[in-house]
Image (spheres, grey):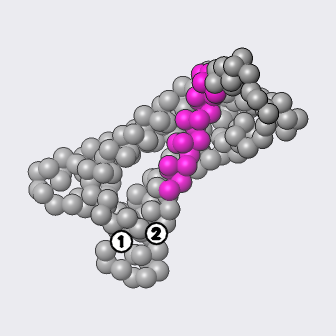
Amino acid sequence: MEVSKDTTRSLLRARTTPFAQFIQMFVVTLVVQTFHMVEHVAQVMQRFVFNSASAHGLIGALDVEQVHFLFNLLYLGTLFYITLGWLNFGGRVCRNYRVLGALLVGSALLQSYHMAEHSVKLVQFLNTGIQGTPGLLGAHFDGVIFHAAMNTAVYVPVVVVFVCSGMYRYVFFKPGSNRRGVA
């Protein structure tokens, strides 16, 4: 079956609309943070299930403050992007877009604090040369638990918005399918 040039152009145009870019960035953000959460689950298990003194996750070579700082800065940027996208397109996705938008705003604000934690940790590392510095609240809590909880708190709202809004329908079902209507 041969595809005409007009069909190809319309498919390319459909994939690059601002709405499609918003959906794609939302999915990329969710997938990347899901893998990040796997790292934190691995750290918690290493520390509390396997009683390991050094809980560095599955990719221990990347467990340095410079990587944490850059990753959290990128995650903050993508959270701002998808939050702004949600404020623009949320009404197109579902009826409860205001409530779900509030979850994304809350997640972005909490990630802003998380970024402040990593900024302090990076300054502490630069001043001492020691990896694994406590940050602001890390001096008062177990670092593995604190950062697993912080990452969970900024991850769960994104999952809730994706699932509760029905956004997955834009990813997993064909356009025009009756399963893709507004929730």
Disc nearer the start of the sequence (1/2): 2
Reply yes or no: does residue 16 show up in magenta: yes
> Residue type at mark 1?
Ala
User: Nearest the camera: 69 or 154?
Assistant: 69
Percent x, y for residue 60? 33, 66
Give the residue at x 35% y 63%.
Answer: 143
Decide if residue 36 is in sight here.
Answer: yes
For label 1, the residue is 55
The residue most toward the front is 2
Above or below for 24 versus 52? above
User: How many badges with numbers are in the image?
Assistant: 2
The structure residue drawn at horizontal position 88% and vertical position 35%, both measured from the top left corner, is: 178
Determine the residue positioned at 45% across, 62% down: 39
What quarter of the picture does the C terminus occupy?
Answer: top right
Q: Which residues are magenta?
A: 14-35
Q: x and y percent of residue 176 in the render? A: 83, 30
Q: Is residue 34 above or below residue 75?
A: below
Could you tell me what secondary structure mostly forms the magenta stretch? helix
